Amino acid sequence: MKSGSEKTASILYASFSGNTRRVARVAQGTLSGLGWSAELVNLRDFERGVHAIDADLIVLGVPVQYWDIPTSARIMIRRLPVFQETPAFVFTTFGRCVCNSVPWALAMELADKNCSVLGGAQIAAPHSARVDGGPRLGDMEEAFGKGQPDSETLLDFRKALMTVATKVEEGQNRPIEIERLKALHTRGVTADLMNRISSHRMRQGFMPWVEHLDVNCEGCNGCLKACDSGAISNDSTGTIVIDRNLCNRCYKCTEVCSNSAMTTDWQRVVFWVRTVHLMARDTTSRFVV
């Protein structure tokens, strides 16, 4: 940790639809308002020697994907350096869809990086599945996160962060019992059972592949730049190619393509999202500090 009166925070995040990035910015604003120096870094852009590894607090946020840490985000987290018993706070955003224990999984990843986890949050946000390729399901229905996170949720998030910041300032860096973060997950017996018996890759298998439509493509390579798994590339003619062995079906490429050159079978996506949602219970935002 750095010495001196000003405390520093590294706010690390992965974001596919923008939900997690928005909450990360709230975290940055909250800590800056307390007089901290708060650096906001996309996990994919983290570089040793460029970004701080000796911060006083690590804040780590990811979306929930297939009720787990996104594959690409987990890889990026495991590439982070080992920290110096640094206090940490974790959070996830989720489309109010399915039982998961991702805050706990994030905390375990940071504990392996020698961080002392002081708290965590799971925050409801609009689900990114698109209805007929148009508006997001989460922008249309409250059951899938419409209007979330609302002002009350964001206030609770800020309070949780301020509590953690105060503990760091006072040197009270004793970690919480990480198992407490499992209490954040949405309830549902069937969904919880599926979480235990199915792998991340098996869950992905229910979702359709991304397809590239040459006729709509303007060659901007925005999809290539956005893909965190390296699944998108150009062939010898400059045409976009998708490696299905690498594709995580996160659909981030469809978010950045303004011409619908990257698309998928959205009816199938929405069908499975609605089906899984039938198993979800108590899909509210929750906090543990």
Image (cartoon, rainbow, N blue to C red):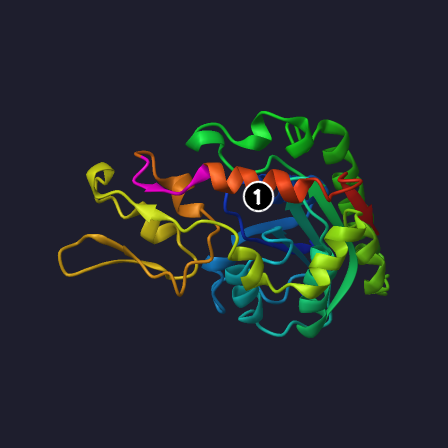
In this view of the protein, which residue sits in the foreground, 207 or 40? 207
Residue at the spot 53% in from the left edge and 71% down from the top edge: 79
The image shows residue 211 at horizontal and vertical percentages of 33, 47
Q: Is residue 4 visible?
A: no
192, above or below 2, in the image: above
Q: Quadrant of residue 30?
A: top right
Q: Secondary structure at mark 1?
A: helix
Q: Would you say 34 lies left or right of 258 here?
A: right
- The count of marks equals 1
**Does 262 lie within the magenta span?**
yes
Mark 1: amino acid: Trp
Q: Is residue 278 visible?
A: yes
**Does 111 lie within the magenta span?**
no
Q: Quadrant of the N terminus?
A: bottom right
In this view of the protein, which residue sits in the foreground, 213 or 53? 213
Q: Quadrant of residue 28?
A: top right
106, above or below 289, in the image: below
Q: Would you say 187 lies left or right of 13 here?
A: right
Residue at the spot 57% in from the left edge and 70% down from the top edge: 78
274, above or below 243, in the image: above
Q: Quadrant of residue 20?
A: top right
According to the picture, the residue beneath numbered tag 1 turns out to be: 272
Residue at the spot 57% in from the left edge and 72% down from the top edge: 81
The image shows residue 72 at horizontal and vertical percentages of 50, 61
In this view of the protein, which residue sits in the foreground, 15 or 281? 281
The image shows residue 259 at horizontal and vertical percentages of 30, 34
In this view of the protein, which residue sits in the foreground, 278 or 82? 278
Magenta range: 260-266
The image shows residue 253 at horizontal and vertical percentages of 39, 46
Mark 1 surroundings: few (<14), some (14-19) or many (≥20) residues within 10 A: few
